[in-house]
Image (cartoon, grey):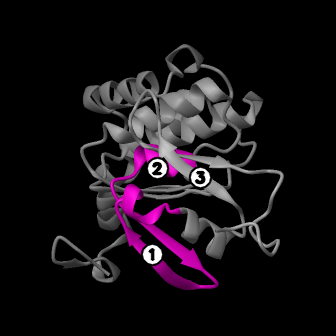
Amino acid sequence: MLLAGQDLGALRPAQSARHIGALPQERGGDFELSVREVVAMGRTPYKRAFAADDPEDHRITAEALLRVGMADAAERRFAQLSGGERQRVLLARALAQQPDVLVLDEPTNHLDVRHQVELLALLREQRRTTLVALHDLNAAASVCDRLHVLHRGALVASGAPREVLTADLLAEVFGVRAAVVEHPLTGDPLIAFDHRSPAGVPGQLG
């Protein structure tokens, strides 16, 4: 895999971690670290072994916590957080890495509606390449510049959300009947699912 012409497989882990930050679905263990300490781990790729955090590390850590709405929880134990709070802290850790590419796997899981909206807004304003795996199609339509749809292990559609998210594709790939309309507030594609008439029922499409 190449990033800006560099073979990522040839880089040392610390070097590759400066280029790519990740937020996996696994929310992390019950380790006894504070929220601030967990986020500060994102600065590890830039430090020598056993080096203490410097003022720049503290600034970047505090800024990352502020951006995900967890600044007031900086001294809490990570193990005491809810699933949604852990999600936001781990996103802050990835942001503290200051990577060129951010990879997120189902980042809105465990978040309430308000924090889902805030996280999606945060992703939209990122000035870096962001690769997101999402099952929430309306969230994908609102935050992504391009969508890539996988079906049975193969890429079946790729393009702008408005080009990809069609009623025919939703029926073929997901087996649902839906209308794709314009979001009244944002203008993004908005999928309205028909929960009464699955696409797989003969005669329901047309």
Quick one: quadrant of the C terminus? Answer: bottom right
Task: From the top left corner, tell me how far across and down residue 2 is, in percent.
Answer: 26, 79
Q: Which residue lies furthest to the top in this view?
A: 72
* In front of the other: 92 or 139: 139
Give, as a single range, the part of the protein colored magenta: 138-166
Instruction: Return the residue at label 2.
Output: 141
Give the amino acid at mark 1.
Ala
Residue at the location (31% across, 52% down)?
A: 99
* In front of the other: 22 or 133: 133
Give the amino acid at mark 2.
Ala
Foreground: disc 3 or disc 2 = 3
Residue at the location (53% across, 45% down)?
A: 139
* Residue 8 drawn above or below residue 141: below
* In front of the other: 176 or 112: 176
Quick one: SS at disc 3?
strand
Quick one: SS at disc 2?
helix
Can you see residue 141?
Answer: yes
* Residue 49 drawn above or below residue 121: below
What's the mark number on residue 157?
Answer: 1
Instruction: Return the residue at label 3.
Output: 179
Is residue 161 covered in magenta?
yes
**Crowd around label 2: few <14 · some 14–19 · many ≥20 (10 Å):** many
Foreground: disc 3 or disc 1 = 3
Q: What separation in Å lies between label 3 and label 2 (alpha carbons)?
A: 14 Å
Residue at the location (63% across, 76% down)?
A: 172
* Residue 59 drawn above or below residue 129: above
Q: What separation in Å lies between label 3 and label 1 (alpha carbons)?
A: 18 Å
Quick one: SS at disc 1?
strand
Q: What separation in Å lies between label 1 and label 2 (alpha carbons)?
A: 14 Å
Task: From the top left corner, tell me how far across and down residue 63 is, in percent.
Answer: 36, 25
